[in-house]
Image: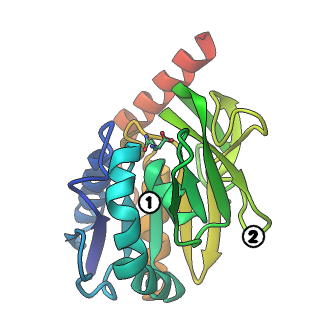
Amino acid sequence: MKFTIGWLYPDLMNIYGDRGNILTLLRRAQWRELDASVVELQRGRAKNMDDVDVFFFGGGQDREQALIYEDLREHKQDQLQQAVKNGAQILAVCGGYQLLGHYYQTAEGERYDGIGLIDVTTQAGKKRFIGDVVVQTSIEGLTPSTLVGFENHSGRTFLGPNARPLGKVLTGKGNNGSDKTEGAVQSMGGGIIGTYLHGSLLPKNPHLADHLIGEALRRRGDGALSKLDDSEELAAHGWILQRAQRR
Ligand code: GLN
């Protein structure tokens, strides 16, 4: 069975090791004998996105966000919306997450309109949030129920009524450092996960990687994934948990 990852703006939206998410999705699909491949979705007219199972949209500084937000609206929005309606999944980290919302406004007052796939708005604050993050996730059935990562952002994101938090912040700042929420999840056929967790996220959270792969494949009738030995990945997860608790 084919499994396709669509990597949005790999040349520009890919900071703090975010490409590790692509490698994790690819390998975990290949380890299940799936015919896995990555399609790079650069600026300009989008290639056919219908076959993409999981989209990844990484982080970027304000400068990179300024270079791609118009392209996202002009050349990617409609196909992304349709793909999610047809059951595809999106994982968006930090700058990518912000632009899937209604807008991202920089500390200088520049506003980059997003595509509103996630009901959130973001305004940058003066101080950057930098450090380990531990989240108690609200996604049903994830074991462990924690997600660990690293945040580095000036954006303060607030959820609108149609978005649910990805989880509750146990350590770190998360969406805005005030309401104890981290990330956002929204479903419209498929699922969209926005998060501030770099690290990169998926290598130390294999349970979330499998959630994305399984949910995307479910639309083809078979989201059941064979079990892998995740002892090393979960040891890394546990180490971050302990380090965060020590701080
Ligand atoms: N430029 C955005 C911010 O500072 C996103 C940063 C990122 O992707 N790490 O909030």
In the picture provided, is 59 more to the left or to the right than 106?
left
Q: Is residue 102 above or below residue 139?
A: below
Determine whether the residue tagged by mark 1 lies in a helix, strand or loop: helix
Residue at image mark 1: 210
The residue sitting at the top extreme is 246
Residue, x 38% and y 42% (percent of image)? 61
The one of 68 and 36 positioned closer to us in this rendering: 68
**Left or right: residue 243 compared with residue 39:** right
Residue 199, how many percent across, how many down?
39, 36
Q: Is residue 141 visible?
A: no
Q: In this figure, which residue is indicated by the disc labeled 2?
A: 162
99 displayed left or right of 157: left
- Image position of 23 (left or right of 202): left
Location of residue 192 by image quarter? bottom right
How busy is the neighbourhood of tag 1: few (under 14 within 10 Å), some, or many (20 plus)? Answer: many
In the rendered image, residue 168, in percent from the top left (x then y), is placed at: 72, 41
The quarter of the picture where residue 50 lies is bottom left
- Say which quadrant the N terminus sits in: bottom left
**Label whose residue precedes the other's in the sequence (1 or 2):** 2
What residue type is disc 1 on? Asp
Q: CA distance from mark 1 to mark 2?
A: 25 Å
In this view, the residue in front, 229 or 168, is 168
Name the residue rendered at 32%, 58% in the picture: 67
Of marks 1 and 2, the one in the foreground: 2
Count neighbours of disc 2 (C-alpha within 10 A) and say few if under 14, some if 14 to 19, many if 20 or more.
few
